[in-house]
Image: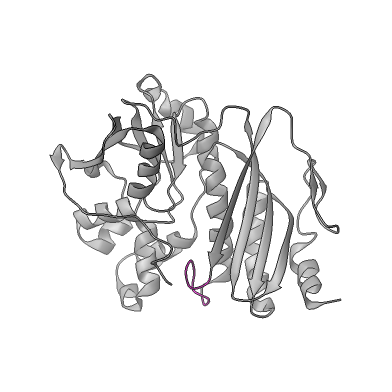
Amino acid sequence: MSGEFNLIDKYLVGRQSRRKDVLLAAGDDCALVKSPSNVSIAVSTDTLVAGTHFLESANPSWVAHKALASNISDLAAMGATPAWVSFALTMPEPKEEWLAPFCDSFFKLADYFGIQLIGGDTTKGPLSLTLTVQGFVPEDQALRRSGAKIGDWIYVTGDLGDSKAGLDVILDDTLREKEGASILESRHYLSSPRVLVGQALLNTASSAIDISDGLISDLNHILQRSGVGASIDVSLLPISQELREFTQNEELAQQYALTSGEEYELCFTVPEENKGAIESVLNHTGTKVTCIGQIRPEGTLELHSNGTIVDWQLSGYDHFKVKQ
């Protein structure tokens, strides 16, 4: 038996209980699955490459969490329920001391969200991970980027900016002595996909997106697809105490919140008539939600602080520019 199949059998096969909708997960050329009736299947694929998305020396447990969580977040942004994942792993050479904690973390998160691994591949090459997740969303109810309307309110989940600060720590060891640095580093890797929030918003929100490239970039995707503009009050941005202590500057913390990539929080819009229901709709999710602005007529994304325009030249996270 080749090294590839030894790795697959030892670390990736037989780790989970079989979902009822999985007819065949391993042992043949394809997996076989059965989808429920009256649903659409949401599909998302992401690749994480060592040196771009994580350091080769990074904790493999954290890398596994980041890889799967980032894909689950795409499903959450459309209100989908996660179901299946396939996984392609490329490694320079088999390293069991890396694979063991990686797979333990991967399956822990997969089991938490009820996701079954149904196939994939292993091959030799530079370290990279490619995952494809699939989930279910009721027909014609998926949240999209194109539904925002003038007057809708703009919300975000969680706190913003921590992932960027954590990346700063990863790239610059001199920052490790700063207050909250270790917490921020862990938050860069250990996001919490907002699946319950996305599901709860299916009949309440008008549009949604997950924050992977920075709020200022991802909100612009909604504006472009919906043909609208927006006004954001930067003083309302949700910022953690750790980020405030790390930056020691409120404006800088706000700029982090606007540009931080790989947050995997949700940004969504809510019509005026549904605004009063948000708290009750999301109460069971236990997730912090903050209203930060409003959709305006077609135009630019305006930033202000308590009504005073701020002229910050900001751009979001660029995977081709940031190297770890």
Image-quadrant location for residue 23: top right
The answer to whether 279 is drawn above or below residue 26 in the figure is above
Residue 73, percent from left and from top: 53, 47
Viewer-proximal residue among 27 and 243: 27
Question: Which quadrant of the figure contains the C terminus?
Answer: bottom left
- Indicate the quadrant where residue 41 lies: top right
Query: Picture coordinates of residue 250 (x, y %)?
Result: 20, 54
Q: Position of residue 76 (x, y in %)?
A: 54, 42
> Does residue 289 appear anywhere in the picture?
no
- Left or right? Give the position of 206 relative to 102: left
Tally of numbered discs: 0
Q: Position of residue 154 (x, y in %)?
A: 34, 34
Q: Residue at x 72, y 64 (%)?
A: 121
Q: In the displayed orientation, state which residue is furthest to the left.
A: 308
In which quadrant will I find the N terminus? bottom right
Question: Does the magenta segment cover residue 55?
Answer: yes
Magenta residue span: 50-57
Secondary structure, magenta segment, majority class = loop
Above or below for 95 versus 253: below
Q: Residue at x 51, y 33 (%)?
A: 143
The colour scheme used to paint the residues is one colour
Q: Do we see residue 234 in this rendering?
A: yes
